Amino acid sequence: MILTWYPYQLQFKYPFRIFHGIRTHTSAVFVKLEHKGCVGWGEATLPPYLPETQESVIEFCKNFSLKASKESMESWTELLAILDTNMSAKAALDVALWNLKASVNNTSIGKLLQIENDDYPLCTYTLGVSDFTEMQMKVADAEVTGFKIFKLKLNGDNDETIVRNFKKLSSSPFAVDVNQGWQTEYEALNKIEWLKKEGCILVEQPLHRSKLKEMTAIKQKSALPVYADESCQRLTDVEVLQNCFHGINIKLMKCGGITEARQMITEAQQIGLKILVGCMSESSVGCTAAAQLTPLANYADLDGPYLISNNPFKGMIVKGGKIQAHPLEQINAL
Ligand code: MG
């Protein structure tokens, strides 16, 4: 087993503005795992609100490859399973291991996970907070590419303007992601009522992640389904959220990869929570792996490859609005 890592800056096609601030790029680390002539790629993508950095991911990889046996894939899987820190670094290694296993067995991650159905969900295209001209370019870009559903980032201040601008440009259904930007149950319920009339289909993370008491009341009264993102990081969060949200947004970078994401889906389905498989603007490495889980999801938000201008890989695509699985392929040197 040979592990190699490559720090990389994923550049956005358009600057990405959300409630937390504005970004032109996302730092990432690609990892390559080689064994018996086969290769498995993984990716840690590190938005600035996460505690991990390229340096901490590389440190994690160095320590891990010193500890793990050079001979066996199983020992890597076992060692990784007991590590419970550095979730983005863990996700990179977990995805690389799953890709390697799929490659060694000449199959896909989905088949290894016994996901047999191929009913892929609609995939949203995320519109960061944008002025009208910028939104116009992004919507045109997304519709030409084949997206049929959007996710508008709201920030609590200009929500009406953002929705009005979007509706001038597109008649497509849309979700909204508030990124914890609304302040009270009252504000949330009023805005949800209004958004339903405007054609919104779901609302992600309306209040601060800790406001679960308010979310319990909102779930009971809400005119639209509410999904947890910041409130739902790991498997241990899922059960706690049963009475607070209708669904959860699962991301590989939050939960440490495919292994725990699969367990979160099982748990969520058992307690009646809907599933959205999302990303943190990963390249095709992260999104192609996450796409393997999406036949189990109600929605996908795996638009990362479409938001990046220097994606060194290609893989999953969106066609007719839906996720379409494709094998991962490196197209540019790192
Ligand atoms: Mg979100």
Image: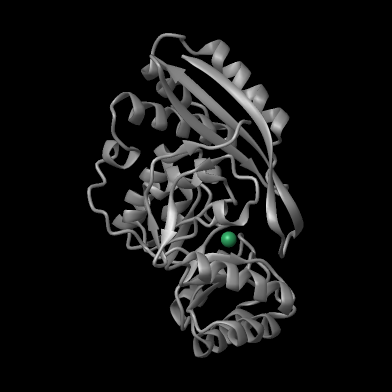
Q: Which residue occupies 33% across, 23% down?
A: 104
Q: Which residue is drawn at 55% across and 15% down?
A: 65
Q: In this view, does 62 lie above or below 329?
A: above
Across and down, in percent, residue 202 comes to 48, 74
Task: Describe residue 11's horizontal placement relative to residue 275 as left or right.
Answer: right
From the viewer's perspective, tell me whether residue 169 is left or right of residue 286: right
Location of the C terminus by quadrant is: top right
What color scheme is it? one colour
Split into quadrants, the picture shows ligand 1 in the one at bottom right
In the image, residue 283 lies at what x, y percent? Answer: 56, 45
Q: Residue 276's spot in the image, x, y percent?
A: 44, 59
The answer to which of 51 and 316 lies nearer the viewer is 316
Task: Identify which residue is drawn at 40% across, 37% down.
Answer: 259
Residue at 68% over, 69% down: 181
Q: How many marks?
A: 0
Give left or right: position of 334 versus 218.
Answer: right
Residue 90 placement (x, y as % from top left): 54, 32
Residue 204 visible, this orientation: no
Q: Is residue 212 visible?
A: yes
Of 132 and 176, the residue lying toward us: 132
Residues 83 and 277: in front is 277
Q: Is residue 138 above or below residue 113?
A: below
Q: Nearer the viewer, residue 64 or 217?
A: 64
